[in-house]
Image (cartoon, grey):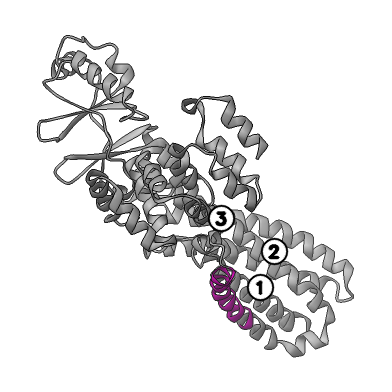
């Protein structure tokens, strides 16, 4: 609490930063947190509520009056207003309705419009606040208008000037540094025609998938992208800070999916909800484990005859599982980053099979030698485990690559279910090849 008080008193409000305040708030216990919220300037509450983990949102809402919540929302940009209202509706629908009714009509219209977009669409992430100029405006008039809007805090994080026709159809996108070399007395159209630069904008449609937008930002190293409709009418913009958040969210979701957990449930404080989601995946894993155990049961007599097999068997399955997970992780991540095109399947599978074969051969030889000297069955047992390990690592590489590629082809998130399927394959192939070869060679 003292650190927060010290920070708030050390600077004027316009020099305070919400991320610093959020960091100090996270270090407090629950009792101090509620008291500390009262000290925070209300214009920062919205940004802080969105920056903090979801578990803090309820405490923030319950510690504020209706007028403070309204003020907090009005201080946000349109995309953040929509996010705030969405979380508020999920937390307390009645309070959300009251707050929404107190907002001005313009904010209500913008929030409703953005909420109507599917969460996978670019339109749901855009800000509707954009700085534009018409083709027939002189640059000096544009600069004057920009100064007025900036002083009144109606514009934030302006990277580019969007040039539109009278009907708001987007024509050009010009960075602020390029504006400095223009003739201030000439119109935007004249300046653009006299320039050697290309000001054609990289655009996205409001109903494009947000993953496509992320790839465009990375491909063209953009700081901002205009969002238009099918008629090329400018609707809003997406900025790089929004893209960073989206990339972080996607990476988290992908990591959770690979582990078989749900990101929304894990961020929730309800233990039963998170437990239920995890249990669904554990149930599936139990079924696959039973399948693998069934394979072992087919060779019960072999295991009883040669105890060494029970000692070595987990090594084969473990090596296959780890090798497959390596391949799976690489392929899933490359798919997420857009580094694999639809024509790359054969190349990826060939590459992963080659790596798996080389590693399989190396560790087959190592483990074969160890087993030969370790157990009384000697050379023949070494051959059994060497062959089964080579087979399992090759299959692990093959399925580690093909499973996510197949899921992507079916338009399913490659991270979802891949681990469970792969583990089942490597366990069954590992056990079957090892025990099957042992039955043939050793008995």
* Residue 5 spot, x, y in % from top left: 61, 34
Q: Earlier in the sequence, mark 2 or mark 1?
A: 2
Please provide the residue range marked out in magenta: 271-290
Q: Which mark is residue 430?
A: 1
Q: Secondary structure at mark 3?
A: helix
Q: Which residue is mark 3?
A: 329
* Residue 387 spot, x, y in % from top left: 70, 69
Nearer to us: label 3 or label 2? 3
Q: Tell whether label 1 touches label 2 (CB within 8 Å).
A: yes
Nearer to us: label 1 or label 3? 3
**Residue found 51% across the figure and 54% down from its top:** 54
> Residue 295 versus residue 173: which sits nearer the camera?
173
Q: Secondary structure at mark 1?
A: helix
Q: Which residue is mark 2?
A: 319
> Residue 313 versus residue 83: which sits nearer the camera?
83
* Residue 93 spot, x, y in % from top left: 37, 62
* Residue 226 spot, x, y in % from top left: 27, 37
């Amino acid at each position: 609490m003292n650190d927060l008080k010290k920070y708030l008193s050390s600077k004027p409000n316009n020099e305070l930063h919400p991320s610093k305040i959020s960091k100090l708030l996270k270090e407090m216990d629950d009792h101090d947190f509620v008291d500390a919220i009262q000290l925070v300037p209300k214009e920062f509450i919205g940004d802080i509520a969105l920056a903090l983990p979801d578990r803090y949102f309820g405490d923030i809402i319950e510690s504020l009056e209706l007028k403070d919540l309204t003020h907090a929302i009005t201080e946000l940009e349109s995309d953040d207003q929509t996010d705030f209202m969405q979380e508020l509706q999920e937390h307390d629908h009645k309070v959300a309705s009251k707050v929404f009714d107190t907002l001005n009509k313009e904010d209500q219209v913008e929030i409703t419009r953005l909420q109507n977009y599917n969460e996978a669409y670019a339109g749901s992430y855009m800000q509707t606040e954009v700085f534009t100029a018409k083709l027939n405006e002189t640059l000096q008039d544009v600069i004057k208008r920009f100064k007025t809007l900036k002083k009144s805090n109606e514009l934030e994080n302006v990277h580019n000037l969007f040039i539109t026709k009278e009907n708001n159809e987007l024509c050009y996108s010009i960075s602020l540094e390029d504006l400095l070399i223009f003739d201030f007395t000439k119109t935007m159209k004249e300046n653009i025609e006299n320039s050697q630069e290309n000001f054609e904008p990289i655009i996205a449609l409001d109903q494009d998938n947000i993953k496509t937008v992320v790839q465009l930002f990375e491909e063209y190293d953009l700081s901002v992208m205009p969002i238009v409709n099918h008629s090329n009418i400018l609707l809003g913009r997406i900025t790089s800070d929004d893209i960073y958040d989206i990339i972080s969210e996607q990476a988290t979701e992908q990591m959770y999916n690979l582990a078989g957990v749900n990101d929304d449930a894990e961020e929730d404080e309800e233990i039963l909800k998170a437990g239920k989601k995890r249990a669904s995946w554990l149930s599936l894993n139990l079924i696959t484990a039973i399948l693998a155990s069934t394979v072992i049961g087919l060779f019960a007599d072999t295991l009883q005859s040669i105890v060494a097999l029970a000692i070595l068997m987990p090594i084969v399955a473990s090596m296959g599982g780890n090798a497959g997970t390596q391949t799976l992780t690489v392929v899933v991540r490359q798919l997420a980053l857009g580094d694999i095109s639809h024509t790359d399947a054969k190349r990826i599978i060939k590459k992963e099979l080659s790596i798996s074969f080389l590693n399989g051969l190396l560790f087959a030889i190592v483990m074969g030698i160890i087993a030969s000297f370790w157990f009384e069955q000697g050379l023949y047992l070494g051959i059994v485990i060497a062959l089964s390990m080579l087979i399992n690592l090759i299959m692990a590489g093959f399925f580690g690559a093909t499973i996510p590629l197949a899921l992507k082809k079916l338009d399913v998130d490659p991270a979802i279910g891949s681990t469970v399927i792969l583990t089942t394959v490597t366990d069954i192939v590992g056990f079957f090849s090892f025990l099957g070869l042992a039955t043939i060679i050793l008995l």
